[in-house]
Amino acid sequence: MKRALLSFALLALAACATTPAPDGPDAPVRALYAIAQQHIGHSVTPLSAIPMTDDLRSLVDRAEAAARARNEPFIEGDLAADCQDCTSLTDLDLYRQGPRNGRAIVYARFKLNGADPRSVRYNMLLTPQGWRIDNIVSGKSDLRADAQAYLAPPP
């Protein structure tokens, strides 16, 4: 009887160990780069494909609407690939810090056009819908700060 209980306990423990964990904060970023790969070389990654928090989505939508009213672009290029007119994205690696208290940072490092190294930081927030991007920061831009600045009244 003890052996049967021990065997059952070991089987239950093994089953728990092989149960996949819920998607982490890097999962939406990995999915975003799968979409970016489909668009690279012929179009930008659509904004609608970026799983943003409601707050960031609202901010970007307002900046985009203001840009349309001014007849100028707010975003030029591909946010995920951090480029304009790039032809390839290779050697993608994702690294993350956290999660801690429902927040994490995911770094995407890759090469553009076979040689140009890039790094993009994604500030992630755990929402009721899962992990969402709350900001995108690259060497050239900070999406949240850029949108806020674009919407600010002129001095």
Image: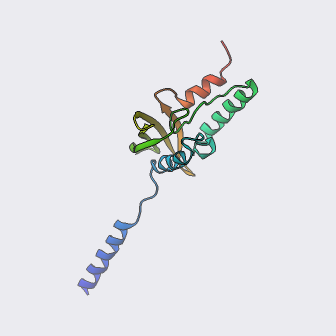
Q: Residue at x 36, y 67 (%)?
A: 18
Q: Total number of numbered labels?
A: 0
Residue 58's quadrant in the figure?
top right
Residue farthest top in this picture = 155
Residue farthest bottom in this picture = 1
Q: Residue at x 46, y 55 (%)?
A: 23
Residue 23's place in the image compared with 51, above or below, is: below
Q: Residue at x 45, y 48 (%)?
A: 26
User: In the shown orientation, is residue 134 left or right of residue 97?
Assistant: right
Q: Position of residue 100 (x, y in %)?
A: 41, 44
Q: Position of residue 50 (x, y in %)?
A: 57, 44
Residue 96's place in the image compared with 11, above or below, is: above
Q: Residue at x 31, y 80 (%)?
A: 8
| Quarter of the picture holding the C terminus | top right
- Nearest the viewer among 93 and 6 is 93
User: In the shown orientation, is residue 62 left or right of residue 97?
Assistant: right
- Nearest the viewer among 31 and 35 is 35
Q: Position of residue 6 (x, y in %)?
A: 26, 79
Residue farthest left in this picture = 3
User: In the shown orientation, is residue 154 left or right of residue 26?
Assistant: right
